[in-house]
């Protein structure tokens, strides 16, 4: 499914108020569920709308404003089966053409994902690649951790021979 062309939304005061009224309750509900604190949830939603207003002149949104405001994210850690952190592992999400690398602590985060079923893949040199199928909802932040097993055929264990005649 191709991505829609980006749409530049002009936010004057009237359209901003409409977006606020249509989306405040949904964003608050998501924030409250995540934070479990009414004051923090209200503060977060306020921050989102202040940011939206401040960026109104340069804002580019692909699709609906509601969907833009509630994009999903995944985060996690990549380790070896023995528990060793794996910095520099490649993490990709097939359905969103999104990806990243794990940091020096083996951690990663991918944001602005479309809600739905996702196939998350991780690869690292010397280890077997791994896939996890997950489902994320709008506004969801889901933890996805990986433990990779070493490849059965390691370069050090290979018997190589070079016959020179």
Image: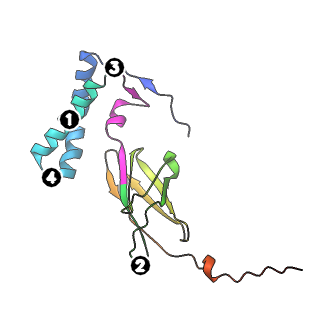
**Element under disc 4:** loop
CA distance for labels 1 and 3:
17 Å
Q: Which mark is residue 134?
A: none
**Left or right position of 61 against 30:** right
**Element under disc 2:** loop
Residue indicated by mark 2? 82
How busy is the neighbourhood of tag 1: few (under 14 within 10 Å), some, or many (20 plus)?
A: few
CA distance for labels 2 and 1:
41 Å
The first of marks 1 and 3 along the sequence is 1
CA distance for labels 3 and 4:
33 Å
Residue indicated by mark 1? 47
In the image, residue 28 lies at what x, y percent? Answer: 19, 41
Foreground: 139 or 160?
Answer: 160
**Residue drawn 24% across the image and 16% down it:** 14
**Element under disc 3:** loop
How busy is the neighbourhood of tag 4: few (under 14 within 10 Å), some, or many (20 plus)?
A: few
Residue indicated by mark 4? 36
Q: Is residue 38 above or below residue 127?
A: above
Residue 126 seen by the camera: yes
The first of marks 3 and 4 along the sequence is 4
**Residue drawn 38% across the image and 65% down it:** 145
Q: Are marks 3 and 4 in contact (CB under 8 Å)?
A: no
In the image, residue 121 lies at what x, y percent? Answer: 50, 59
Residue indicated by mark 3? 57
Query: Foreground mark, 2 or 1?
Result: 2
């Amino acid at each position: 499914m191709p991505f829609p062309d980006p749409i530049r939304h002009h936010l004057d005061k009237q359209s901003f108020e409409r977006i606020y009224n249509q989306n405040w309750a949904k964003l608050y509900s998501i924030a409250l569920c995540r934070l479990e604190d009414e004051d923090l949830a209200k503060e977060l939603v306020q921050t989102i709308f202040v940011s939206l207003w401040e960026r109104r002149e340069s804002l580019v949104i692909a699709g609906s404003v509601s969907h833009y405001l509630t994009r999903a994210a995944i985060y996690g850690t990549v380790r070896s089966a023995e528990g060793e952190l794996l910095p520099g592992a490649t993490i990709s999400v097939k359905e969103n053409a999104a990806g990243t690398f794990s940091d020096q602590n083996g951690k990663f985060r991918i944001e602005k994902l479309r809600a739905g079923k996702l196939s998350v893949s991780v690869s690292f040199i010397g280890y077997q690649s791994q896939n996890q199928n997950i489902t994320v909802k709008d506004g969801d932040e889901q933890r996805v951790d990986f433990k990779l097993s070493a490849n059965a055929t390691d370069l050090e264990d290979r018997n190589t021979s070079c016959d020179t005649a």
